[in-house]
Amino acid sequence: MPRLLLLLPTRTYRAHDFLEAAERLGVDVVVGSERKQALADLVPGKTLALDFYNPKAATQTIVSFAQDYPLDGVLAVDDDTTILGAMAAKALDLPHNSGSSVAATRNKHRMRMLLSQAGLLSPPFSLFDIDDDPVQAAQQVPFPCVVKPLCLSASRGVMRANDPEQFVSAFQRLGTLLQAPDVVERGDPLARQILVEGYIPGVEVALEGLLVKGELTVLAVFDKPDPLDGPYFEETLYITPSRLPEAVQQDMAQCTARAARAIGLKEGPVHAELRVNDYGAWLIEMAARSIGGLCSRTLRFGTGMSLEEVILLQAMGADIGSHTRDRLAAGVMMLPIPHHGILRSVHGRGAAVRVPNIESLEITMPLGQEVIPLPEGAQYLGFLFARAETPERVEAALREAHQQLSFVIETMHGACG
Amino acid sequence: MLVITEAAKEKIQSVMESQGRGQNGLRLGIVGRRMSSFQYSLGLVEPGQDTDDDVVFDAGEFKIYMDAGSVQNLEGVTIDYVENIQGSGFKIDNPNPLWTDPQHMAVQELFDTRINPNLAGHGGFVDLLEVKDDTVYVRLGGGCQGCGMVDVTLKHGIVAMIKEEFPEIDNVVDTTDHASGDNPYYQPGKG
């Protein structure tokens, strides 16, 4: 049985889906996490504790482990593990991305420079330190603009500013977020910097792909029918296939492939966010991993394979060329967080899942926990999934089911957000 | 079939009176087996909350309701209420064996002596519900319920150990309602 090291942060949403996929494929998975698993001592060779913030040391741990338990593949699941994944795969002489390419996907300023240098459509951009004077910085940026952290994911910390006053507020707010304990504990020097880009108007889509020897295979293109105009960029609906014209989708695929080449990515899953307007396709961001949260559950390939199965097969060196997406349209709603507070109860679950074409509902936020909306929030409230003949029906089902849900969130006084 | 000490009776009556909603009595059930002990649920029963399947024990001043699945293992139980320097609470002495079937006993021993002591470090536990044919049914709780890494704990820990110790077992079914977990050890989050 082939053995693959799956780099899974303990904060991942993806453990269940990847382990299920591995079981279906008969792949012996070793789980590498930044903390020791509860039963690690009782079952040797199945889990591995790795220092994700020290990839050099973690790579050495993996190489030592592989002497006793040879590895046929290494797969990084979330952003936190992509650099280690590349380094470990290289050390084990397995197909890998270069460390510099993966590092660029973890640094939005570096990525923006590479894309611009390669001649891709790029907005003006500037880099600031969190200690810089935002009033002075406001004199150097275009408006409207978008204020971003270099190192966070899923729209966390991303804010639009239409004028200097909004800019100063957004800059200070992001500076505060970047000093939050969960960000600081990573010890990432990038967390002291802020990227400011010109705002790119247009329709936003997400592209899910796989790179093999530098060639991009597009697995799915998701429309995002809810407007993402700011001031924050809370993602809600992802629906595939895209309803954009075929030529536009081709343009996006070409843009993504060019971006991957510019960054230097050659192997494994990629998740790209793009905007399309009269000038063409603009790459907003690219990650060297697959789609986040539970959103991959929208995708089925061939005779029902999951995205995780396709990714695992590719990581094991199998041919993935024939895996076409299921003919049905599908979509997910990342449930919007209504306001900050403590989640006390969720009502209407039964009614929501009874809406025709709704496949399932997952509330991922435990009751009693603090829910924090963007731009500070770092957790999803939950996910609604739908599948139907057309994207229009999927979208209608998700919107109707969401109407059935109500969340009791007890307001907290004197807290952030 | 049950013995309720005077201290326990007084406490139960006191709690019922303080609630003041005309309770019928107390519901007693077995919810699991862990670390050589049954795990119990205790709660007040308000009018209309009893069911036709309940087995009812008349304790005089109040009734004790037991679900049919628990009643066999509650035979001869003594309910006491104790107050000492460590605290206060109901104490249940149960003379019944956790299991009588050797396979159940062996799996329970694996849970009690090896798996649960390690899960306790994460505030979690696993209960053995049943062994039927080639399948073991379990339920996880505490920090394991709803934990983002529970699949790793299950597949790379509990399942692996069960299959190693009991080659005749092909399946382990997790019956946990993970969505109801309110204190998971690892909570997923965005990067």
Image: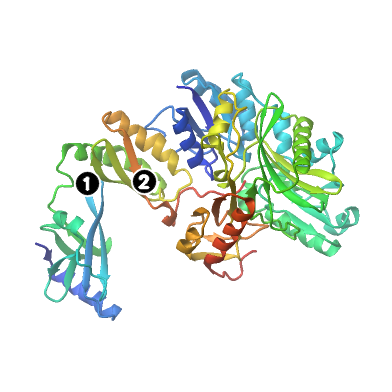
Q: Is residue A159 left or right of residue A339?
A: right
Q: Residue at x 65, y 42 (%)?
A: A187
Q: Amino acid at mark 1?
A: Ser
* Residue B118 falls in image quadrant: top left
The answer to which of marks 1 and 2 sits earlier in the sequence is 1
Subunit under mark 2: B
Residue B24: give x, y in percent of width and height: 21, 75
Badge 2 element:
helix
Graded by Cα atoms within 10 Å as few (under 14), some (14 to 19) or many (20 or more), the crowding at tag 2 reads some
Q: Who is closer to the viewer here, A156 or A121?
A: A121
* Residue B83 in the image: above or below residue A314: below
Q: Residue at x 44, y 30 (%)?
A: A46
* Residue B5 in the image: above or below residue B128: below
Q: Is residue B172 left or right of residue A412?
A: left
Q: CA distance from mark 1 to mark 2?
A: 15 Å
Q: Is residue A363 visible?
A: no
* Residue A189 falls in image quadrant: top right
Residue A225: give x, y in percent of width and height: 69, 55
Of the numbered discs in the image, which one, if any, rests on residue A85?
Answer: none
* Residue B149 in the image: above or below residue A333: above
Q: Which residue is mark 2?
A: B120
Q: Which residue is mark 1?
A: B36
Callout 1 and callout 2 share a chain: yes
Q: Who is closer to the viewer here, B18 or A317?
A: A317
Q: Amino acid at mark 2?
A: Ala
Badge 1 element:
loop
Q: Who is closer to the viewer here, B66 or B54?
A: B54
Subunit under mark 1: B
Q: Quadrant of the N terminus of chain B?
A: bottom left
